[in-house]
Image (cartoon, grey):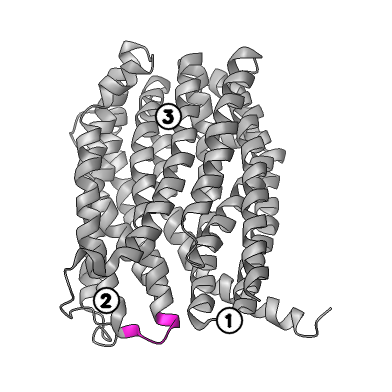
Amino acid sequence: MSPHLFPTVSRHALDLARLSGPVILSRAGLMVMMFVDAIMVGRFSTQELAYQAIGLAPLMFVMVTSFGLLMGTLVRTAYKLGAGTPENCGSVWQRSLGYSLFISAIGFTASCFGTEFLILTGQEQNIAAGGGEVILILGYSIPFMLVFITSAFFLDGLKRPKPGMYLMIAANILNLALNWVLVFGNLGLPAMGASGSAWASFGVRVFSAIVIVWYIWNLRDRDVFGIRKRNSRNWSSWAHQRKIGYSAGLSNAIESAAFSAMNIFAGLLGALPLAAFSVAFNNLALVFMIALGIGTATAVCVGNAHGRGDVRDMAYAGWTGLGLTVVIMTVLGLPLILFPDLMAGIFSKDLNLISAATPMIAFLSFVLIADGSQSVMAHALRGRSETWIPAVLHVVSYLMIMIPSAWLLSHTLGRGAIGLFEAMLIASLVSVSLLSARFWWLCRKET
């Protein structure tokens, strides 16, 4: 064993912890909003929770795909910082703002046809109508959401994730207040249920986008990073930034489409299984944000090492991120095994809903480890500027394996909604194995 192994791993673990802590809180803040939305809507009405769940499924596909398309902002910012050219970082952010608005226009257009899409998937008319209204309202917020995300990616790439964390804390407080007013109909306003929660999200995203852009534009060291410097508008001059985003966007699209299909499959089982699946999936998504935060920090560390040309340090950064994720996901999965009924009870007082969701929540602890690990390794590959291979591996894992397995387990074999989570576990194990093998091969090839 190398005498440098322990200090090197310790250094990377501390660096990841320092970076990922604020990033986790920032990314988890996005999920906490959805978690709170689901709790408040679920306590208002189980039927409204079903509308919210089915409405979020296709919209999450649009949003998560967009996040991937903007991933080049983080990777290229970290690379330029590591390469010793910080004055070029501002151009990465400026270009990403216009790009985010272009992507938003496509996403909003798609959201205008939410009801029609849900009807095409075979949903009941009332579920399609309620879910379609949620999709349309949230569609209005897509531009503000993407401006915030690409700006947060920029700050993460600069190794300055704390402002995004503080802003997300404020946004969650605002979201809680707006949900209280709009979902339940307080302060003289009518109770709006799932639609009220969607309007609350719109307000929060407008606030977040305005504040983070103002903050970056007025950074004290803005001149060091070229924040206000005019840059080339030539489309080809930032092709590599977009290329990273194309591959990350495709990977996210594949994974998100597959997970959205899980919601569609759950909806075909009925309103109660759909609501129960939503409760369990919200628990999964909330904890997964921690893995996403570690993955983002891992991408930054790998990107910095890649920018310096330090292959050994790049490998240590990637594997340390994976190890840290496995440990943390294991620890966080324990409460889900031990107290699944309590976790389900947070969302609703409906005993039938709690009973249906409890076994799914208990099973989540296994899914968390595999899904969190594959996400971190995908981020490590993107930090190394790997483009299309992660997307191809996600096609294999999530389109070719998870979707057929989910239908087989949940419908053909009669496993019900828990069969959807069993399919997630199978696909995530395949994904982490393939992504890890690819990262190992790249590191070995370059040493």
Q: Is residue 292 left or right of residue 241?
A: right
Looking at the picture, how far across and down is residue 439, in whole percent?
Answer: 62, 61
Foreground pick, 338 / 126: 126
**Which mark is on residue 183?**
none
The picture quadrant where one finds residue 47 is: top left
Q: Secondary structure under badge 2?
A: helix
Check disc 3 and report the residue beneath it.
43
The picture quadrant where one finds residue 231 is: bottom left
Residue at screen point 47% across, 65% down: 385
Looking at the picture, how far across and down is residue 345, in whole percent?
Answer: 56, 32
Looking at the picture, how far across and down is residue 383, in whole percent?
Answer: 49, 66
User: Is residue 85 located in the magenta-colored stretch of the structure?
Assistant: yes
Q: How many marks?
A: 3
Check disc 1 and report the residue beneath it.
310
- Neighbor class of circle 2 (other Cα within 10 Å; few <14, some 14-19, many 20+) is many
Q: Quadrant of the N terminus?
A: bottom right
Over which residues does the magenta segment extend? Answer: 81-86
